[in-house]
Amino acid sequence: MLVDTHVHLNFPEYAPDLEAVAERWRSAGVVRLVHSCVEPSEFPTIQSLAAQFPELFMAVGLHPLDTEQWQPDLKDKIASLAASDPKVVAIGETGLDFYKATNREEQETAFWAQLEVAHSLNLPVIIHCREAAAAARDLLQQFVRDRGRVQGVMHCWGGTPEETEWFLDLGLFISFSGTVTFKNAKQIHASAQMVPSDRLLVETDCPFLAPVPKRGEKRNEPSYVRFVAEAVARLRQCDLLALEQQTTLNACHLFRLPLPAELTP
């Protein structure tokens, strides 16, 4: 029983065989998925996927690497789309990426605006953060001071234990992807060992970052989230079934997903 908290199934890599991909995730015990959004224009396609697959829920937002598109009216558009469908469970993915882009001011403007949408709609935010942990922490701390606390997740987390602590202190969840299975990802391993069990999530970020033992494949898919969970369980020296149940509960709590029947009191 697992929740893949970050997928991009609308990407063209899945067009030929999406039904088969779905059969594999169901066979692997993936009971819920959260479909992230790179830009609002994707929303109708993501919405149709959520209608096709009852276990698929969705987010809407603008990725930091696409913030050259940012216009003030996009804030209202994201808010309107988020309010338009009950299967929208988050805003995002948003955040900061200074690894591939240098437009810091645009990224911070778009990130702040999407935090405001999430806060106003009482939705969690899916945060992308690459080579920008200190800036993201500072902006989130400022937002908490000025607007109030937001819930959310640091997705596909790759930060140091110190950086991990920053975001835990802000009340955020931490989600690990296939990178946690990589042999030399020592700081990710250390972070996976320190996150409290009630703040831990797993994801694929598919089609990217296929985990070991599927790392050589060009396309990741939701069924491979099991390899992520197995790696995290080994690192934490805990029972895999217990980790599956805890991360499923955590995802259902954060995103307000329906609890699987097996976990319903």
Image (cartoon, rainbow, N blue to C red):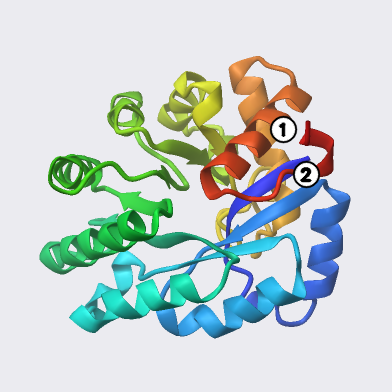
Write the residue at 80% across / 76% down: 17
* Residue farthest to the top, as pictured: 237
Write the residue at 63% across / 70% down: 9
Residue 1 in view of the camera: yes
Q: Which residue is mark 2?
A: 260
Residue 222 versus residue 183: which sits nearer the camera?
222
Left or right of 240 in this view: 165: left
Vertical placement of residue 150 versus 233, above or below: below
Identify which amino acid the numbered label 2 is placed on. Answer: Pro
Secondary structure beneath dot 2 equals: loop
* Residue 168 on image: x %, y %: 36, 29
Dot 1 alpha-carbon crowd within 10 angstroms: few under 14, some 14 to 19, many 20 or more: many
Identify which amino acid the numbered label 1 is placed on. Answer: Glu
Q: Which residue is mark 1?
A: 244
The label shown at residue 200 is none
Write the residue at 66% across / 22% down: 234
| Quadrant hosting residue 206 | bottom right
Quarter that holds the N terminus: top right
Residue 12 in view of the camera: no
* Residue 45 on image: x %, y %: 59, 83
Quarter that holds the C terminus: top right
Give the number of marks: 2
* Residue 82 on image: x %, y %: 45, 70
